[in-house]
Image (cartoon, rainbow, N blue to C red):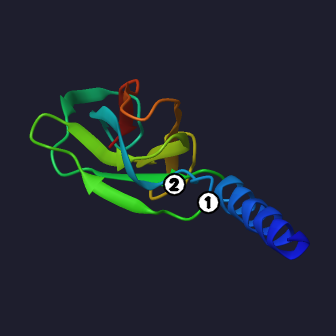
Amino acid sequence: MKIKNLLKIISILAICITYSSCKKEPGEGGRATIKGRVKIKSYNKEFTILKDEYYSQGENVYITYGDNPAVQENTKTSYDGTFEFPYLRKGKYKVFVVSKDSTSPDLTATISIIKEVEITAKKQTVQIPEITVID
């Protein structure tokens, strides 16, 4: 009888350890969504005169999950500059777009415009602030 009780205790401990170690990290597989919009500001070569502003179609938007610096997914903006990353789990994310760097003397230099986002509920939709890119 002692062996049966010991086996039950070991089984219960194994189940508890398994469930507690199965915390899902940020990433795909959930029901939350991150949405946003990308606007382009088009300047002359010297970045002194604003020529045009518009919502960009086909702009690449990237996302990283949690503390992982590698790009996990990317999407392109729609005709009205909107984008969406669906099917995400709770956690922290970074959404970014590449822009020309108006502060660099190198006219080909780029920077990442990053928006940090946190999903706190399973079915949450997070609308991030508009991302403005310099072209």
Residue 80 is situated, as x and y percent measured from the top left of the image, at 12, 34
> Which residue occupies the extreme right position in the image?
2
Name the residue type under label 1. Pro
Q: Percent from the top left, x then y, of residue 99?
A: 42, 47
Q: Residue at x 33, y 27 (%)?
A: 49
What residue would you read off at disc 2?
A: 64
Q: Nearer the viewer, residue 21 or 114?
A: 21
123 above or below 95? Answer: above
Quick one: which residue is furthest to the bottom in this view? 3
Q: Name which residue lies at 25% across and 50% down.
A: 59
- Quarter of the image for the C terminus: give it: top left
Tell me which numbered mark, 2 or 1, is placed earlier along the sequence: 2
Crowding around mark 1 (Cα neighbors within 10 Å: few <14, some 14 to 19, many 20+) is few
How many labels, in total? 2
Residue positioned 51% across, 48% down in the render = 112
Residue 101 can be seen in this image: no
Instruction: Identify residue for label 1.
Output: 69
Q: Quadrant of residue 60?
A: bottom left
Where 124 falls versus 58 (above or below)? above
Q: Amino acid at mark 2?
A: Thr
Q: Residue at x 42, y 35 (%)?
A: 122
Q: Secondary structure at mark 1?
A: loop
What x and y, as percent, mark residue 88? Answer: 40, 47
Q: Are marks 2 and 1 in contact (CB under 8 Å)?
A: yes
